[in-house]
Amino acid sequence: MDIYIDRDELSRGLARVQGVIERRSTHPLLSHVLLHAREGGLRLTATDTEVAFIGDLAANVSQTGQLTVEASNLFQIVRAMPEATVQLSRTANHRLQIQSGRTSFELPGFPAEEFPALPAFDQRGSVKVAERELLRLIEQTHFAVAADDIRYGLNGVHMEERVVDGEQRLRFVATDGHRLSSAETAAEGALHLTPRMLVPKKALAVMKKLLGRSDEKVELAFGEGAVRLSMPGQTFWFRLLDGEFPDYEAVVPSDNKVFALLDRNALLAALRRVSIVVSERSKAVRFAFGEDAVQIQVQQVDRADMKEDVPLELQGAPITVGFNARYLQDILTVLEGDRVRLSLAHPLAPCLVEDPDASGAFFVVMPMRLD
Amino acid sequence: MDIYIDRDELSRGLARVQGVIERRSTHPLLSHVLLHAREGGLRLTATDTEVAFIGDLAANVSQTGQLTVEASNLFQIVRAMPEATVQLSRTANHRLQIQSGRTSFELPGFPAEEFPALPAFDQRGSVKVAERELLRLIEQTHFAVAADDIRYGLNGVHMEERVVDGEQRLRFVATDGHRLSSAETAAEGALHLTPRMLVPKKALAVMKKLLGRSDEKVELAFGEGAVRLSMPGQTFWFRLLDGEFPDYEAVVPSDNKVFALLDRNALLAALRRVSIVVSERSKAVRFAFGEDAVQIQVQQVDRADMKEDVPLELQGAPITVGFNARYLQDILTVLEGDRVRLSLAHPLAPCLVEDPDASGAFFVVMPMRLD
């Protein structure tokens, strides 16, 4: 193996690999990246046996060959190289030499045969989705996934097919029992979804890093308990969690009587100020929705108090509700429009949060009892 | 107490206080700042009883008064305020109300009488030093102070008076036994230095934040076991450590025979690359000074190797020496010129590091035995 490659191209490729590798595994090769110099370029492969990534980079290959080395070490070294071109070559004892200008590193490696097997994937169907839309689906749902919940079905994002006005749509839904996120977008092709297909947190985190905000289409393919994302030069696939997602439609309120329309950024700024004084997640913050403003209020014995009025347009009668302010903050952060609408029925009913100017997502927050 | 004050002015004032307060103390008021609204402005006072800070800020005072509140809480709140002006007023039960636009916070406080006593200071003499020069003295020495060494005399920066060509100079010296830093500058006035006056790490850290890079003069005053720094609107004073600094002049080499002149940034970049593969502080890195270049080399069994040539101009015979590369990196980071000179006698003799174009500082690094 002997190649010349652009330092920044290699650095970007290795950055994508960092989320895939498993640093704290008993199997040392799960923290490695497999380098494969082939006709036409360098292929990077990484896996933790649950998820796998293949990235193809342009490179000037004088001699083909394969080798694995520790991925985070290689990434740090490549980034720090003095010149724009880096030479990678294999030396004795499966060592990788990395050269640039008058600098030379050598990393211990393993032969490619010892690299762990990649998870299998047998395609049943696939759809095309706009790259920026798939990123939005992930950003708008991932934070509501439960953190290691004993209810196994809450530990990933549930995927389902919807048909709206004859258009096929892919919906992502997540909930931890306290709040729920749902986001959907148009998907062209054969969606092959069955129940009990949950996208795990790690796969969501990797895809969040891989995806950009272009309007280009990417391919999502569905297999037996697995999903594969394909983009030019990059393929990422992962095993799904086999858990039963709850019947979430029951908690989405449909009989709301009070509708509050607010400036999203003004409300978000107020919620960030709330978070300065509210440290515990379980603290109910008082939201008094009035004719012209919502008064947000935190009162704490022997600790900091806080009060802020955020202007609103109200439809329906004034109402006072307790919320975990952090849950509202999470939602407002991933909405994209200038305005936000909160729809309420009574102080202990779930609250629906939406962008009144976009129909691709909705959120539900359970209220909290005020003392 | 009732005042209006510019949010950013108050925020900057509170930022200065953050390094002074003691967050993890059993005495709750050591994490507080004393706010004193007086004719003409707001005075901030903070102390951990070893160091103390007073800062005066411009403010529109409608009602004078005093109060203490938790300093880091207040800082976070003020920074997040929505409008450019903030109103501070005292409410019932020694609470402080902070208002801006439609936002209002209240923090629990204590009456000023409960604020801890400030360390005493009786001035014996004082000098004027350029602000940027005092900052340089601190930056070029603080990192060589020992970290909680059992040799008490190494736990701070030693100060001494020097006279060079009839000019009075203030010198700072620090060592941890492995490397030594010395930096000095012109000081006008009455230096009142006695032995056993060591500036502790915390005072160095606070001054590093308070001082800027202006050419204006600041005042350093010397008292019995204490030093006070005065700048317009700010006073900071601290107790000195009463420890015996070693006779350091003995380790400064004067019989060097080999002189290597290098580009500071090129050597620094190489040392940063060395640090990627050398994790242990105790690892000796091989520096082979040759006719045209120093070859820096790290060899490690079953781990990463590294080799880099950095061009130099050599006077004297080639020589190979082992160094803790991190120590050289620390020094090059705080030098200001384009070039650096390393002066050596033999492989186990201390190495002198200097800027060949500036005489205000020198550094000594002890070599390490190569395997």
Image (spheres, coloured by chain):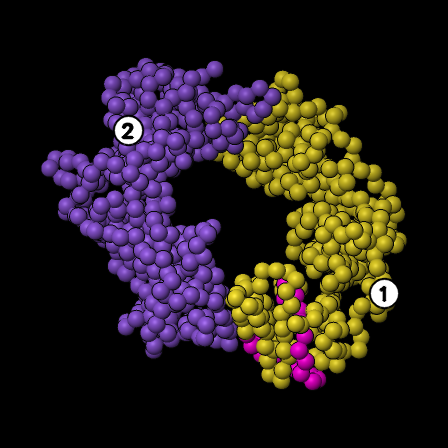
Chain colours: A purple, B yellow
Q: Is residue B350 visible?
A: yes
Q: Is residue B312 magenta?
A: yes
Q: Left or right of A267: which side holds B301?
A: right
Q: Left or right of A78: which side holds B191?
A: right
Q: What chain is tagged by disc 1?
A: B
Q: Is residue B56 visible?
A: no
Q: Quadrant of residue A78?
A: bottom left
Q: Disc 1 residue type? A: Val
Q: Left or right of B118: which side holds A371?
A: left
Q: Badge 1 local density, few (<14 within 10 Å), some, or many (20+)?
A: few
Q: Residue at x 42, y 17 (%)?
A: A369
Q: Residue furthest left?
A: A166
Q: Give the image location of residue A33, x and y in percent.
A: 39, 61
Q: Give the image location of residue B190, x and y in percent.
A: 86, 54
Q: Badge 2 local density, few (<14 within 10 Å), some, or many (20+)?
A: some
Q: What residue sits right under mark 2 in the picture?
A: A246
Quarter of the image with the N terminus of chain A is bottom left
Q: Disc 2 residue type? A: Pro
Q: What chain is tagged by disc 2?
A: A
Query: Would you say the magenta stretch is mainly helix, strand or loop?
Result: strand
Q: Quadrant of residue B287?
A: bottom right
Q: Is residue B32 magenta?
A: no
Stretch in magenta: B308-326
Query: Do the residues indicated by labels 2 and 1 lie within the same chain of the protein?
Result: no
Identify the secondary structure beneath mark 2. loop
Q: Give the image location of residue B64, x and y in percent.
A: 68, 26
Identify the secondary structure beneath mark 1. strand
Q: What residue sits right under mark 1 in the picture?
A: B163
Gap between marks 2 and 1 measured at Cα: 81 Å
Q: Give the image location of residue B147, x and y in percent.
A: 72, 52
Closer mark to the observer between disc 2 and disc 1: 2
